[in-house]
Image (cartoon, rainbow, N blue to C red):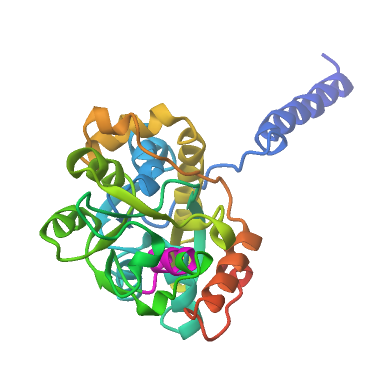
Amino acid sequence: MTRPRRAFLGVLAAALVAAVSGCGLLSGEDPAPAGAEQAKIRLGVLPIVDTAAVHIAIKKGYFKDEGVEVELKTIQGGAAGIPGLVNGELDVTFGNWVSFLSAQARGVADLKLVADGYRGKPDMFLVVTTPDSTVRTPADLAGKKIAVNTRANVVELAVRAGMKAKGVDANAVQFTEMPFPDMQAALQRKDVDAALLVEPFLTRAMQQIGAVPVLDTITGEATDLPIGGYATTAKFAQASPKTVDAFRRALVKAQRDAGDRAEVQNVITGYAKVDASIAGVLRLGLYPGTIDVQRLKGVVALMKANGMLTGDVDPGRMLL
């Protein structure tokens, strides 16, 4: 073989290798990291439908494929996960957007938003009471005790916005903080007059004690309300950017899977200990693949309108 021909074939081979290696970029997929800075991520989660994608990703090996292991830590609510981030007990946490935005505005934490998690739909974020309760309409809630999982979060915001839409003063309500799993029994004991229940606890309470809906909070200004997502601290994001990227890639893939109801049903019977009969009729929201900054700005506006934010915060500046 002549020298010019060998040179030509060498150039051709190099071009083919470059073309093949570039296919991932052309397909729109991010290349896998050279290596995550740490092999394990301590993740704060709640046993609710909002976090189904995490369990799908674990079951399907998406995190493993990205070179990270996820260690789950159960928290009571998004607000409860933030101290864990700050003190280093958690690396990433699921939480509601209201708590994340409020903490950032108050300077409690310097947070970075990693991925979207869950968005509301009508008939899935309901204030309910017992069949024998005198509370039958939103107006009847005035002066009553309403259970929420944590104060000053998206649950309280939804109740306030929902009551405001019905012309009821939410400031007359006494919000009582307790974990979602405890609310059904609290309703039965009359410890509270009503509770905002989310899935799977909503359907379970309807089936087991005949819980009666009084107020659908995902309406009016709260229509399509962004519920929650995943956040970390700026410190962790700066120290472990490849780890965060690997986590996000795996989660986003599972978020797409969660759009198939069967995928959610397959995992929630395990991590939330839900009977198959309940899993089949859960009222599900949406599992977005990307963070919508404009929707989060709408959450900020809704917080201000309902007296839950006095300062200011720009969600766009919190994105990684």
The residue depicted at 38 percent of the width and 74 percent of the height is 152
Left or right of residue 211, residue 153 in this image: right
The residue depicted at 42 percent of the width and 40 percent of the height is 284
- The secondary structure that dominates the magenta segment is helix
Residue most extreme to the right: 4
The residue depicted at 22 percent of the width and 52 percent of the height is 130
Which quarter of the figure has residue 168? Answer: bottom left
Residue most extreme to the top: 1
Q: Is residue 229 visible?
A: yes
Q: Position of residue 283 (x, y in %)?
A: 40, 40
On screen, residue 59 above or below 30: above
Relative depth, front residue between 66 and 93:
93
> Total of numbered circles in the picture?
0
On screen, residue 262 above or below 35: above
Span colored in magenta: 152-162
The residue depicted at 45 percent of the width and 73 percent of the height is 235
Quadrant into which the C terminus falls: bottom right
Relative depth, front residue between 257 and 232:
257
Quadrant into which the N terminus falls: top right
Q: Is residue 154 magenta?
A: yes
Q: Position of residue 228 (x, y in %)?
A: 45, 58
Q: Position of residue 317 (x, y in %)?
A: 61, 72
Q: Position of residue 169 (x, y in %)?
A: 44, 76
Residue most extreme to the left: 189
Q: Is residue 238 visible?
A: no
On screen, residue 274 above or below 99: above
On screen, residue 17 above or below 236: above
Left or right of residue 258, residue 142 in this image: left
Q: Is residue 40 magenta?
A: no
